[in-house]
Amino acid sequence: MAKSANQKLKLLYLRKILEEQTDEDHPMAVAEMIGQLEQYGVSAERKSIYDDLEALRLFGLDVVQTKTGNRTGYYIGQREFELPELKLLVDSVQSSKFITHKKTLSLIRKIEGLASVHDARLLQRQVYVRNRVKSMNESVYYNVDEISDAISRDRSISFRYFEYTVGKERRFRRGGGRYQVSPFALMWDDENYYMLAWDAAAARLKHYRVDKMTGILVTEVPRQGREAFEQVDMSAYGQKVFGMFTGEERTVRLRFAAHLAGAVIDRFGKDVILTAEDGDHFTVSVSVAVSPQFYAWLFGFGGEVEILGPEEVRRGMYDRAAQVAALY
């Protein structure tokens, strides 16, 4: 009886064998397939394997036949994800700070499962995650799921929000009291996940680090603040807000050294207008949220950038520089 049940699964086991063990450099002969099926308790004849391979082709699996001398083999050609795409996914996962070390290894193992065992070894050579800075909040993935559920259901959420102390312990804001907001979007900025939400008490949009949220509850209270959110250009939001530090939005005029054009385009996009001032400098007017992180970004360029206006933003940079200089 058990053998009969396994026989019904023959086609599924054959697909599993081909996907896991074959690729262009590792074709498998029919005799090998029969031997592999026997390990699953499935007996097969050559003719039935040929019929099964044809059925898999008709189903849409790219089963490729190849001949080397007198040896005929088969392998999976086109896959859902090609090896370069999988390498890109592995790189993205292992470089993301909001994904914990434990979850990083788990996700990479799953990504490896999308390739043959032979290609998976090539992916394993890229795994260097142990000493990278990673989130300490394992629940970030469930937080994203809860927030997405609330957005799809048009509901507000409540949660507790924390920060880390010098002793690496959680310290809850508002004395551990719960926040209640209306979530509208999830964003990935500066290697962290953020939620953009309407805070009814403050009557404005705010963003929160998803990995600093805990105890998320989806309420039955409908979301508020839709009109404010619809006025936000999400594609430009990350260009204006530096490191997700909020501040008064101002149009700021800057002068940069000419060789920094690439850095400005990377930050503000290709549509930003750069006006050549002379052979060594250019000016640009951009809309930004003036914040400590904005000034910190400018500090990174040293004397190769100058704020031309407004005067209060220029003065803000002077005050920041004076505060830093006073430490030395």
Image (cartoon, rainbow, N blue to C red):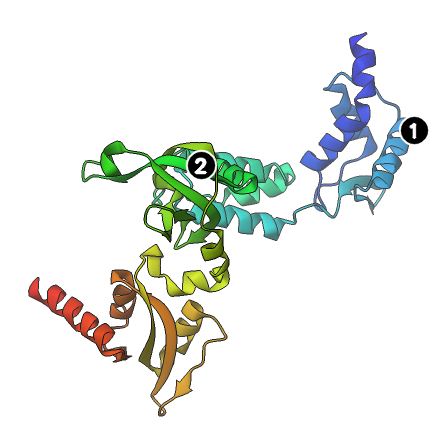
Q: Secondary structure at mark 2?
A: helix
> Residue tagged by mark 1?
47
**Disc 2 to disc 1, C-alpha distance:** 52 Å
Point out the tag, 2 or 1, that comes first from the N-terminus: 1
Is 254 on the left-hand or right-hand side of 58?
Answer: left
Residue at 46% of width from left, 51% of height from top? 187
Image quadrant in which you'd find residue 260: bottom left
Q: Give x and y (percent) for residue 276.
A: 40, 88
Residue 40 visible to the viewer? yes
Is 53 on the left-hand or right-hand side of 267?
Answer: right
> Residue tagged by mark 2?
143
**Considering the image in quadrants, where does the C terminus appear?**
bottom left
Observer-nearest of 132 and 38: 132
Observer-nearest of 93 and 43: 93
Where 22 falls versus 321 (above or below)? above
Q: Amino acid at mark 1?
A: Lys
**Considering the image in quadrants, where does the N terminus appear?**
top right
Total numbered circles: 2
Q: Give x and y (percent) for residue 65.
A: 83, 44
Q: Give x and y (percent) for residue 136.
A: 34, 37
Residue situated furthest bottom in the rendering: 278
Residue at 35% of width from left, 68% of height from top? 288
Observer-nearest of 13 and 265: 265
Residue at 79% of width from left, 22% of height from top? 9
Q: Give x and y (percent) for residue 3.
A: 80, 12
